[in-house]
Image (spheres, rainbow, N blue to C red):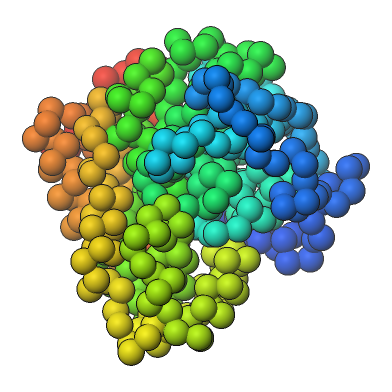
Amino acid sequence: MAKGTAVIFRRILTGALIVAVWAVMVVAPAGTASAGPVLDPRNDPFYAQPTSLAGHARGQILNSRAVEVAVAGVELPYAAYQIKYVSTDSTGRPQADVATLLKPLSTKGSPKLVSFQPAIDSLSSRCDASYQLRAGTSVELPQIADLLNQGWTVAVPDYLGPDHQWGAGQVEGHGTLDGIRAAENFASAGLDGPATPVALAGYSGGAHGTESAYELAPTYASELNIVGATIGGLGADMRDVLRRANGGVFSGIVFASLFGLNRAYPKMGIDEMLNAKGKQLQNNISGMCVLEYMAAYAFRSVQSYTINGIDPLTVPAVGTVLAKNSAGALGTPRAPSYYYHASADELAAPAKVRKLVARYCARGLRVEMVTEPGDHFTVAFTGFPGAVDWIAARFAGTPAPSTC
């Protein structure tokens, strides 16, 4: 099968899989056929923070367990584990994070690892991948399955951390990189430690976590053998993304991201800006996943929920935080990268990604940027096979192409 035909076929297959997952999610209760209902992380002792992490190294495993990954209560044929490991928050304070590690049915050659950052985009642990993969509600399972079918081990971190500081690049990058360390430290993974070739992958909210890890890797985890990063639908400029979303179909993202960032940077003062209606919204949205709050708060402007209609996006303290958590602010990566973006992306402007790519090109990085036909949602699925092929070429040792 020709390469172009193969990519098209896999795009169709991925689309069919996502439709199937959505269909079973509508009618299926959370839980697996053999294990019964899966405990919400808030009620599951496995997720509890240790009383002290003094003396523990980043990426050190604190606990682990074998789990089942399922769709509609049907267990999928992958070996899966949850690993609880040491990471750090936005201030460098130690914390315990959780990742799901999935092993393929068969491997090809020496072991390879992909760290896949899903679009968690929420303030609640019930939206984390470690829970949703077990409960059968992960909409990105088809992409994860595609990676496993290549013979690669996949780590899926709950990279927002226990406080769900969504949008805070430091905590997202730390959680991702320490999850890779933990996977390499986990004997049942069968990896080659720091020598293991690693690729990073994520789309939309997952792209932010991936980009953050990509930038932080040379200084935070220089021992990792990261061969490349695929980053799709990246909102490179956070303030631009929130301005575009405010008052539109994606307006729930404005509220959730500001609340998440405020958890990491309370000096933003978001809490003090909220009126009574805004405080109620904050309480409501803190328990919702992305599709829930997008449906509940579409076409709402943030000014309707603040005292005297203040626009937080015009407040200097907020602007400073948004700038320091936008793409390119955390450091210069070393590995090559592949950016893919929708031609009609209504949320994340392609022009902002092109600007980021130009900066990386000027620093000597090998960067490829691909524009795919479609919008922000469709390219999450249709653009993924190209990312998988790009990763496969890096694992094979083929020099990375560049559009610089």
Task: Identify which residue, 61 or 268, lies in the foreground.
Answer: 268
Left or right: 73 with respect to 347? Answer: right
Rendered view: 309 above or below 291: below
Q: Where residue 386 sits in the image (x, y, percent)?
A: 39, 40
- Work out which quarter of the rendered image holds the C terminus and state it: top left
| Front residue (pair 398, 37) | 37
Residue depicted at x 32% and y 47%: 340
Residue depicted at 53% across the width and 59% down the height? 122
Q: How many marks?
A: 0
Instruction: Please tell me which residue is depicted at 30% across the width and 43% down the height of the picture.
Output: 339
Q: Where is 162 relative to 112, above or below?
A: below
Q: Is residue 5 visible?
A: no
Q: Please, is residue 384 above or below residue 222 in the view? A: below
* Residue 274 pos. (x, y %): 43, 79
Q: Tell me which corner region of the image, top left, top right, bottom left or bottom right, holds residue 82.
A: top right
Q: Nearer the viewer, residue 265 or 376?
A: 265
- Above or below for 115 versus 314: above
Find residue 317 and report its horizontal and vertical position in percent.
Answer: 25, 63
Residue 234 visible somewhere in the drawing: yes
Residue 203: image location, x then y, percent = 43, 49
Pick the front one: 135 or 14: 135
Q: Quadrant of residue 374?
A: bottom left
The residue shown at (66%, 34%) is 50
Q: Is residue 317 left or right of residue 81?
A: left
In the picture, measured across the screen, residue 109 lies left or right of residue 247, that is: right
